[in-house]
Each structure stands twice: as C-alpha cells, then as structure tokens.
Image (cartoon, rainbow, N blue to C red):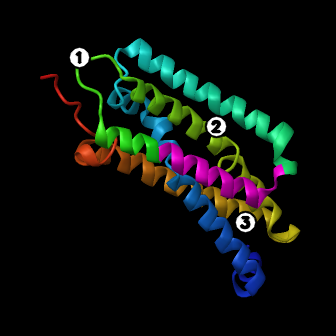
C-alpha cells in the first residue's frame, strides 16, 4: 500500500487525478442533495407542506424522482452527454432550482394556517427538478469519473479516496444541516412561517 501511496502522491499526474477525485466528492456533497435526503420532511414542512402523510408522500416522490432520473441517465444519456458537460449543465440547473427556492423562502414564505400558494408549489417542483438534475450529473458522474481518470494500477486506491471523502463530507452535511435549520432563520430553509394577520 505504501508503494501505491508513493506512486499516487509523488508523481504529478497521479497526484492531480487524486486531488480532482477529492474535490469532486467534496463538491458532490456541497450540492446539498443529502441535506434534502436526510431532512426532506422538515424542508417540505418549511415550504408549507403540512401533515405527516403529505410530507411522507413528498419525500417518497423525491426518492422516486431520483431513482428514475438516475436510471434514465445511466441507460440512455451517460455516454452520449459526456462527463464534463453533464457536470456543467446540471450545476446550472441545480443552482437555478435552489435560487428559486431561496427567493421564495425569503420573499414570500408560506403563512401558517393558510394554503400553500402557487409559488410554493413551484418551489416544491424545484426540489424535484433539483433531484433529477443531480442524478443527471453530480450523482453518478462523480463515481464514473473517479474510476475512469486514474491509471489501472491506482484505480482502486483512487476510488477508495473518493468514497472516504464522500462519506466524510456526507457526515459533515448531516451534522451541519440541523443546526442550520434552527439558526439560519429567514436566511435559509429554517425560517419560521409568518402567522396570518
């Protein structure tokens, strides 16, 4: 293992590939997908969806959208779209979806006791669009990329570094989001809905 480590970190081309792997996995977690995965009921509730059954339904639809989108991407699109292009385009799509959600939460959050406005339903759709965009890029492409870029001799070690980084930052996100939901107030998903006047 030490020979492989030396080969990975002392040869500039191999080191560059290892650093790309680590950065890709950090960026994958910083998209926010696991924040939504783990805390979807609270996030949907903060967007105005009320009732446990409705929250669970919305969370279930979120999971179905992710699964179907990932399957469609891997079967039909992965090789024709290309790795770099899928990462770039889905970054834009995810950013636009989150921008709309952020603006909705900031400008016209749902009011307690009132039905969800049309803008709120668009925000919910944006969460599903975010999930689909993630599965067309940052979800599977990072794993494809980290297994394709290293030399054959270093492939398993490179993927191991990628997986370790992914799980480390998965842990960071899982630990940070509850505090963010509580402390960010109207600057994030953790807002307190306005009471009707």
CA separation, marks 2 and 1?
Answer: 31 Å
Residue 43 placement: quadrant: top left
Q: Is residue 53 above or below residue 116?
A: above
Whether residue 97 appears in magenta in the rendering, the answer is yes
Mark 3 is surrounded, within 10 Å at the Cα level, by few (under 14), some (14 to 19) or many (20 or more) other residues, namely many
Can see residue 49? yes
Tell whether 33 sits left or right of 12: left
Task: Give the labeled residue for mark 3.
Answer: 158
Residue 78 at x, y = what percent?
Answer: 82, 47
Residue 13 at x, y = what percent?
Answer: 77, 82
Tell whether 183 sits left or right of 119: left
CA separation, marks 3 and 1?
Answer: 52 Å
Task: Give the labeled residue for mark 1.
Answer: 113
- What residue range appears in magenta? 81-98
Residue appearing at x 41%, y 29% in the figure: 119
Query: For the residues carrying marks 3 and 2, which lies nearer the camera in this image?
Result: 2
In front of the other: 90 or 179: 90
Q: Quadrant of the C terminus?
A: top left
Residue 146 placement: quadrant: bottom right
Whether residue 91 appears in magenta in the rendering, the answer is yes
Question: What secondary structure is marked by label 1?
Answer: loop
Residue appearing at x 63%, y 29% in the figure: 65
Question: What secondary structure is marked by label 3?
Answer: helix
Question: What secondary structure is marked by label 2?
Answer: helix
């Amino acid at each position: 293992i030490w020979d492989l480590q030396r080969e990975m970190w002392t040869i500039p081309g191999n080191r560059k590939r290892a650093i790309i792997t680590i950065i890709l996995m950090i960026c994958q977690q910083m998209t926010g997908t696991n924040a939504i995965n783990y805390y979807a009921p609270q996030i949907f509730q903060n967007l105005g969806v009320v009732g446990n059954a409705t929250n669970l339904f919305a969370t279930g639809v979120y999971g179905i959208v992710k699964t179907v989108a990932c399957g469609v991407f891997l079967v039909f699109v992965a090789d024709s779209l290309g790795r770099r292009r899928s990462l770039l385009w889905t970054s834009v799509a995810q950013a636009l979806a989150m921008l709309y959600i952020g603006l909705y939460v900031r400008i016209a959050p749902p009011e307690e006791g009132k039905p969800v406005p049309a803008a709120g339903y668009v925000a919910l759709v944006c969460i599903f669009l975010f999930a689909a965009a993630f599965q067309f890029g940052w979800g599977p492409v990072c794993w494809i990329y980290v297994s394709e870029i290293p030399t054959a001799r270093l492939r398993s070690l490179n993927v191991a570094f990628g997986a370790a980084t992914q799980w480390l930052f998965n842990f960071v996100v899982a630990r940070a989001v509850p505090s963010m939901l509580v402390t960010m107030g109207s600057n994030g998903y953790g807002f307190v809905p306005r009471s009707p006047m």
